[in-house]
Amino acid sequence: MKQIITFGFLALALSLGACQSKTQKETAKAEQETACKGDCTKCEKSAEHKVSATTAEAGVYYFHGDRKCKTCKAVGAKAKEVATNLNANFFDINFDQEENKELAKTFQASSSGLYIKSAKSGKIQDLTTFAFRNTINDTPAYIEKLETVIKAELQ
């Protein structure tokens, strides 16, 4: 009986390990496929607006680090797409760059995040949790909520 239980646990451990390895390989492959093929320092800097912490404009702020996972990339891409379609300001901010550290503190962004700074009140709305929970799992709900907030706060 002890042998059956031992073999059962061993089989379970091996199967979980195999799943973990496969997931990591798939994630690495997806990141490699979507990686920038050119000089990323040029494309990232041209896409980013220069915004100071004291005069942050109203708009959609997407904060991220130097390295982005699949979900981070999707949050930023969809947010930029929606903001562009609604003619709203979109700010792609890499908080790992020294010049963006103060702005990240203003938004209290210590990791990847999505924020809307209202044109009406100047208040900052944090959509990070909703965005990361729904961008991939329920894209239509993410886009709908983002459109609603942008229309209410920025137009």
Image (spheres, grey):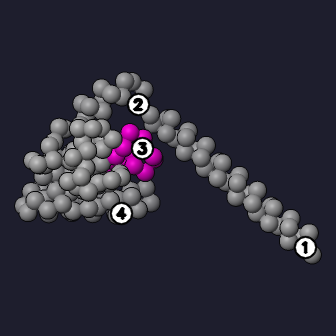
Q: Amino acid at mark 4?
A: Thr
Residue ID for mark 1: 2
- Dot 4, crowdedness within 10 Å: few (<14), some or many (≥20)? few
Image position, residue 117 (x, y; %): 16, 56
Please indicate whether residue 107 sits to the left or right of residue 153 in the image.
Answer: right
Q: Earlier in the sequence, mark 4 or mark 2?
A: 2
- How many residues crowd mark 2 within 10 Å: few (<14), some (14–19), many (20+)? few
Residue carrying label 3? 68
Along the line of sight, the residue nearer the viewer: 11 or 95: 95
List the residue tagged with mark 2: 36
Frontmost of labels 3 and 2 is 3
Label 3 sits on what residue type?
Lys
Q: Secondary structure at mark 4?
A: helix
Q: CA distance from mark 3 to mark 2?
A: 12 Å
Q: Quadrant of residue 134?
A: bottom left
The residue labelled by disc 4 is 129
Helix, strand or loop under label 1:
helix
